[in-house]
Amino acid sequence: VYSKPDDRYEAVSVMDVHHIESTGNESCLSGTKTPNKKTRGLYQYIRMELCDGGNVEDYLRLDGTTNLVHGWPSLFFQMVYALYAGRAHHQLRHYDVKLLNFFLQSTTGPRTQDDPPHIITYALEDKLVKLTSPYWVKLADFGTADTDATTFGLPIGVEHSSFLVLQQQLSVSKDNAAVLCDTVYRLVVLFGLDQLDGASSVVSALLLQQLAPSPKKRHATPAQRQFEVDVSMYSVASGASGPIALARRRLQATPGAMDVFRSLVHFDPAQRPTMSSVLQSRMFDALCEDNSDGRAVATVAAYGGARLLDI
């Protein structure tokens, strides 16, 4: 976690032993009682919590969402809420958002499949969001966060620039170029070429040139033919692959969910929604009740009545 006002890292990854040593915190490793006097030592206080439900990735893969009356939207709402609260309350931006970093903690202690579901309510402006879920969702690993309050609404900055990260990775090994190309290719296979704007992006123009059919050419290129085959199997919109088709059915079963999903992964970052707009999207309408009079007692009431920040 980097503190811009203090111009220093206040915490680093517990896996980066050499970085911990460089801050003067040998006590974390060798048992020394005081930090190294040669450098400006910073003590790190690390609190770890064992969540009995494990991480969300394993939960969805092993258990599905059969225990949730409202299905996966109950989990997803809490995930977005955690990201929003971290940003709005603590000016933290999470740079490693993935299912593996969200953990599940039972709402009423250890549970079995026969236990009744637990009701969790969130006050959100003039609404009450009611979730039927056996778990709290907790967000972990803010180890790459930014604590500068002036970054509201701004790009993530030079230090965390995605292009800078790519440059660093490409300079380390040429093999990383293949990984990068594979990742971009899978993105357009999943979500199509219609998000690309060749006029404003060199990368988009190159992808369209290589993969989109051209009226000027009678026959498709090998790359275009392979792209067509891959799209037929793995496109979110129409792919025939079993897992893809299942994901599509689940998204389509919740009004507005597909639109939110596609917007979150839009090729153009400027087109992606804010966290507050996702929380207020129609995909959660089925979970909402009117609370304009503010009388309802919510389990989590931090954002009841007040307008959400557009972040």
Image (cartoon, helix red, strand yellow):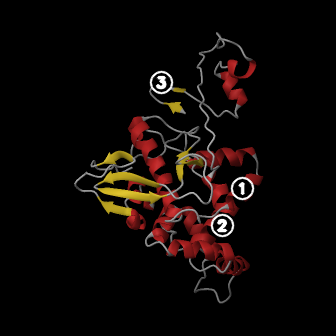
* Residue for badge 1: 177
| Three-letter residue code for mark 2 | Tyr
Label 1 element class: helix
* Residue for badge 2: 185
Figure check: 164 above or below 270: above
* Residue for badge 3: 6
Horizontal side of 28 relative to 248 (left or right) equals right
Q: Residue 132 versus residue 278: which sits nearer the camera?
A: 132
Q: Earlier in the sequence, mark 1 or mark 3?
A: 3
Q: Residue 239 versus residue 122: which sits nearer the camera?
A: 122
Residue 192 in view here: no
Q: Residue at x 39, y 49 (%)?
A: 311
Residue 34 in view here: yes
Report the Cα–Cα distance between label 2 and label 1: 12 Å
Q: Earlier in the sequence, mark 3 or mark 2?
A: 3
Q: Residue at x 67, y 32 (%)?
A: 14
Numbered disc total: 3
